[in-house]
Amino acid sequence: MSPKIELIPVTAIPEIKEGDNLSEILLDALKSQQLDLEEKDIVVIAQKIVSKAEGKVVDLKEVEPTPFAEKLGEELLKDPRVVEVILGETRRIVKMQRKTDTGVMVVENKDGLVLANAGVDSSNVPDNDKVTLLPEDSDGSAQRIAVDITNQINKDVAVIITDTVGRPWREGLTEIAIGTWGINPLKDYRSQKDKEGYELTATLIAIADEIAGAAGLLMGKNDAVPVVVVRGYEYEFEEIGSKSLIRDPRFDLFR
């Protein structure tokens, strides 16, 4: 058990634009706060700034919706241009539902994540006619940032990229890990004994999601804190991504 876990908001991150080097910006921001990264810190980064740096921003004025997108837009009360962008990020439509104000498309995206609207989002984008997409490969993005930081400071750090999602059975949104590097996203307690001596048989904890959720308390939605450093959590450094968090479709009741 970690004796103490500290969450440090990185508040000096400027508006990110395509081509920006996030690792350099992060280190500069920490320096301005008179902070340094330590060995095995976990850097939690909001997906939005990763997408902006990677140019995953679409100008809706340049989108020509197909007849299918026009039809879905009418049925779901959604901008058909946004629907077209969602379809472009979609491997498979899981469910669609029209609400009183707008509809929702639950899809499996190209990266295997099942989420609303394929992660296409217009929040925290300066231009109202632009939307952001999820990174092309969130694990790859996390790896590049982590390796770049390590090369600059000669310390191993883990990186978790997060997005805000809803969950079956539960109201409200929370942060989850959509990309990781340097930390196993799952902690397996199976075959271990609990304090009463009973063997655990089904305890597999999504620690990357728990860390993402904790960081989300500081990130907020309007607080301009896109990066949080988690310090003091004990883990084994592993060169591994987040794919193990995606449930096998054979055991997924929502696919």
Image (cartoon, rainbow, N blue to C red):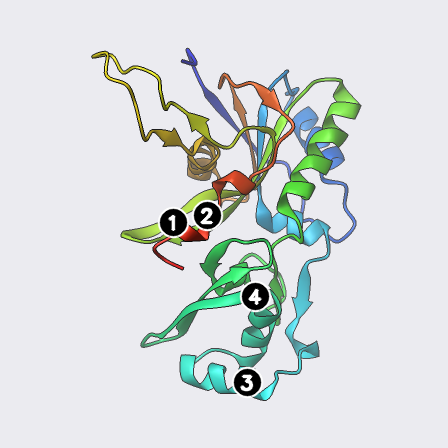
Mark number for residue 248? 2
- The CA distance from mark 4 to mark 3 is 14 Å
Q: Are marks 2 and 1 in contact (CB under 8 Å)?
A: yes
- Is residue 4 or residue 198 the one in the foreground? 198
Establish if 4 lies above or below 61: above
Q: Secondary structure at mark 4?
A: strand
Amino acid under label 4? Thr
- Is residue 241 or residue 43 the one in the foreground? 241
**Residue at the spot of label 3:** 68
Q: Are marks 3 and 2 in contact (CB under 8 Å)?
A: no
Mark 3 vs mark 2: in front: 2
Residue found at x 49% / y 19%: 233
**Residue at the spot of label 1:** 251
Badge 2 crowding class, 10 Å Cα cut-off, few under 14, some 14 to 19, many 20 or more, is few
- The CA distance from mark 3 to mark 1 is 31 Å
Residue found at x 65% / y 38%: 142
- The CA distance from mark 3 to mark 2 is 30 Å
Instruction: Tell me residue 124's x, y (percent).
Output: 56, 56
Mark number for residue 90? 4
Badge 3 crowding class, 10 Å Cα cut-off, few under 14, some 14 to 19, many 20 or more, is few
Q: Residue furthest left?
A: 196
Amino acid under label 3? Phe
Q: Are marks 1 and 4 in contact (CB under 8 Å)?
A: no
Mark 1 vs mark 4: in front: 1
Amino acid under label 1? Phe
- The CA distance from mark 2 to mark 1 is 6 Å
Q: Quadrant of residue 80?
A: bottom right
Lower sequence index among marks 3 and 2: 3
